[in-house]
Amino acid sequence: MSFSRALLWARLPAGRQAGHRAAICSALRPHFGPFPGVLGQVSVLATASSSASGGSKIPNTSLFVPLTVKPQGPSADGDVGAELTRPLDKNEVKKVLDKFYKRKEIQKLGADYGLDARLFHQAFISFRNYIMQSHSLDVDIHIVLNDICFGAAHADDLFPFFLRHAKQIFPVLDCKDDLRKISDLRIPPNWYPDARAMQRKIIFHSGPTNSGKTYHAIQKYFSAKSGVYCGPLKLLAHEIFEKSNAAGVPCDLVTDEVAVIDEIQMIRDPARGWAWTRALLGLCAEEVHLCGEPAAIDLVMELMYTTGEEVEVRDYKRLTPISVLDHALESLDNLRPGDCIVCFSKNDIYSVSRQIEIRGLESAVIYGSLPPGTKLAQAKKFNDPNDPCKILVATDAIGMGLNLSIRRIIFYSLIKPSINEKGERELEPITTSQALQIAGRAGRFSSRFKEGEVTTMNHEDLSLLKEILKRPVDPIRAAGLHPTAEQIEMFAYHLPDATLSNLIDIFVDFSQVDGQYFVCNMDDFKFSAELIQHIPLSLRVRYVFCTAPINKKQPFVCSSLLQFARQYSRNEPLTFAWLRRYIKWPLLPPKNIKDLMDLEAVHDVLDLYLWLSYRFMDMFPDASLIRDLQKELDGIIQDGVHNITKLIKMSETHKLLNLEGFPSGSQSRLSGTLKSQARRTRGTKALGSKATEPPSPDAGELSLASRLVQQGLLTPDMLKQLEKEWMTQQTEHNKEKTESGTHPKGTRRKKKEPDSD
């Protein structure tokens, strides 16, 4: 009996009649003994099968989650195997199974069928438990085990049954070739047949910040009968939406006349690049206008070569000059009207805003999680020459989408947290591309400052900034990809019991890409998938929910995604009235920073509702009402940001160090290794100067300050300012204590009375 027939036989249904016993046993008799010939045949077959797969990479078997195969209970037909032979002695069976497991030939044979040491062990444990715990076994395996126990067969005869069981708990073993075909991502243009049926005209508007490239593309968009705009920020999309409606350009047609893809260089983004790739390859428009850095030109031309489409490149030069200063700001006392301090953490935003307010200056604040309306309001406040606000404190959110009247960009730090292709958090100096994007906001053509200036807060960072800006921008080598819903559905057909998160893991592991593409990091998608895994949803709906853009660091937003999915699974529409109750509307103005952050989270939840309303209109039916509610919330947040320094005061119990504190993003710098030479130099210099001075106001507090100085998180200038503030606060505190002793009904004393509480 050949091995292939043995495998086929091993799949036959159980419960054969007694008349089949002789045929089964006679088929096995030739294989009594060590069977070196059979194992050799199997190895040849497995090797041939492996080579036919085209030399695919070895899969990461740690991603294969074993399924549970329950032992068989008592059969209604009785134990047929025992009737044909005799009841099995479980002690003898255990010895046979242990012998089978230890056979090197069996382990090698398992490896030929995709069972590495880990899978082989897991499969054997499951197989042994199944054999030992079943009340009755299928007749075929019962007979083989009985014969082995009596010495009439060899332990190797168990392999077909073992392999069958292994494929039950690891179904991926039985469909690896199909999965490799499904996850073959080497020809993404073929995913978009409608776009391939058109002969699109591709126009690349290439140039630096403030060169007019986006302006020219948008003008073409406004002159069209229909169009679509794709950009990285809600703020940009909101602005184009409003202008488009005002110009009477519809955006809801199946085939558009003109499409604009802004910031095309983000096609390389480790997490979001796939969205730009989909737009570039899949938009159905007669003209597709791309706006972005010259670094993306070569890649775009290569990708369009595979679609048979030509690319017209239009080069633009910067409209106003910009220069890097030879001196750093050194102190906030040196701020001038039109200055913008760029920070890379919200904590630094709060700290700098507070220090500016102490100096009697007013500042506008812009950071990424603010609603678009609030950002625009802060930008308008800063741009207004008649407004007393002359300083802007912002994150790199200003790098895209806001027209700001900035004279000088000041980098508060050059270290920016980022997520690499593996989803790992890194603390690295900003890239040349990022530095140019941010620095280019100074001296814009439409502002009152016709020349821009760039510098740093600390002198030690200035040389590094100059070095970064002088470096050539590396050409973009590859575009991001993301598995489509159709591909995941085909995967699920072969692995119906796998979770969506596990499907993604296996898909990425099996995927094949050529040098022009890479698979984006899927951690955020998997986070959402695991969050809603227990909710009964169809795979397509589950996929859509998992692609919803949420900030997984905001608990309320995450719980809202969960609640929205639960409502959807119950077929209960999420109405305006329901959402008002859910967010506990009306909301009060913020009294502190935490309140402000909570309001920002609620705004994100409303964004999530609107995003889902485009995909599931019947279940999220009140989009227009939610937009009105969101505008009202935007106004509340605007008031909070306008008074942000007051909120900071209310939030800081220990203003001296917690104000400059680093509770979240910046604290990670203490455990991370900074690769910036300037940062290390600054830390060493500060350690040699200020950290060795004797403590002046309070030894315990200065001890913590010393540690921050050693880590390079405080400079001597900052420490002097903190000491000055501390002394001022101590003086005010002592004065208040004196006043409260003279006037028992003072404010502080009154707050401690039970009635006041």
Image (spheres, grey):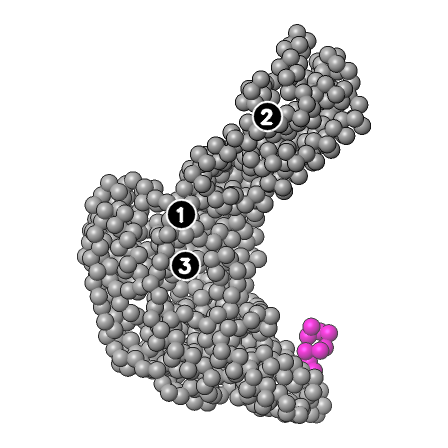
Residue 755 colored in magenta in the image: yes
- Determine which residue is flagged by label 2: 37
Categorize mark 2 by other alpha carbons within 10 Å: few (<14), some (14-19), many (20+): few
- Residue 681 position within the rendered picture, expressed as x and y whole percent measured from the top left: 52, 82
Mark 1 belongs to which amino acid? Answer: Val
Q: Separation of disc 1 and disc 3 at Cα? A: 16 Å
Secondary structure, mark 1, is loop
- The picture places residue 427, in percent across and down from the top left corner, at 51, 69
Whether pointer 1 and pointer 3 mark residues with C-beta atoms closer than 8 Å, the reply is no
Q: Where the C terminus falls, by quadrant?
A: bottom right
Residue receiving disc 3 = 269
**Residue 249 visible in rendering:** no
Main secondary structure type of the part rendered in magenta: loop
Give the SS element for disc 2.
Answer: helix
Res. 52 in view: yes
- Answer whether residue 28 is magenta in the image: no
| Position of residue 559 in the picture relative to residue 146 (left or right) | left
Work out how far the residue at label 3 is from the one at label 2, CA to CA, in angstroms. 54 Å
Q: Which residues are magenta?
A: 749-757
Q: Amino acid at mark 3?
A: Asp
Q: Nearer the viewer, mark 1 or mark 2?
A: 2
Q: Is residue 620 left or right of residue 211?
A: right
What residue is drawn where x is 56% and y is 71%? 673
Does 324 appear above or below 40?
Answer: below
Mark toward the viewer: 3 or 2 = 2
User: Height in image: 236 above or below 569?
Assistant: below
Task: Specify the label residue 513 is tagged with.
Answer: 1
